Image: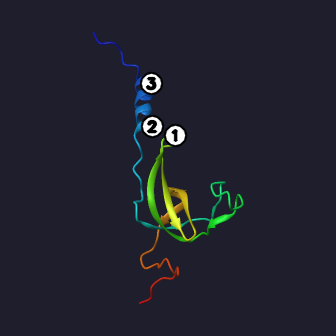
Amino acid sequence: MNAPVDTAAHAAALNALALHEPRVAAYAWGQRVIALDDLVNDGSYPERAVDAVLAERGAVGEIVNVGHATESNESIYLVEFVGCVIGCFEDEIAPAPLGLLPETDEVQGG
C-alpha cells in the first residue's frame, strides 16, 4: 500500500524549485528602449545628488547588458542613456517606437 502524498509539502517543494528558475528577460541586449518615468539617482552616482533625475521620462536608451537579480527573480537591464548607464527593471522601460532617432528624439517623417 502506498503512503498518502502530503500535497502541501509537495506544493511547497514545487514553489521552491520555481524560485530558482530564472525568469526569461523580456528585452534583449542591443534593444532600444524608452524610460517610462523619470529615472532618479539612488546613490549609485555619488557625483550627482540623490534623487537627481538621470534620465527623463521618454528618454531613449540602448540595453548594453542584461542581468538577473536572484533574490527577486527579476531581470535587470543596464541601459545606456545620454550621459550615463542606468540599471533598470522591466517596469521602468519599454521598447522604443520604430523610427525614433536617439540623437534628436524625433520621429522620422514620411
x 65%, y 59%: residue: 41
Could you tell me which quadrant the N terminus lies in? top left
Q: Residue 8 carries which label?
A: 3
Amino acid marked by disc 1:
Glu
Secondary element at tag 3: helix
Foreground residue among 58 and 87: 87
Q: Where 23 sits versus 61, above or below?
A: above
Q: Quadrant of residue 86?
A: bottom right
Mark nearest the camera among 3 and 2 is 2
Q: Where 57 sits versus 49, above or below?
A: below
- Decide which of tag 2 and tag 1 comes sooner along the chain: 2
Residue 23 lies, in percent from the top left, at 42, 46
In the picture, measured across the screen, residue 5 lies left or right of residue 43, that is left
Are there few (<14), some (14-19), or many (20+) residues within 10 Å of tag 3?
Answer: few
x 29%, y 12%: residue: 2
Q: Which mark is residue 71?
A: 1
- The residue most toward the right is 49
Q: Where 108 sits versus 61, above or below?
A: below
Amino acid marked by disc 3:
Ala
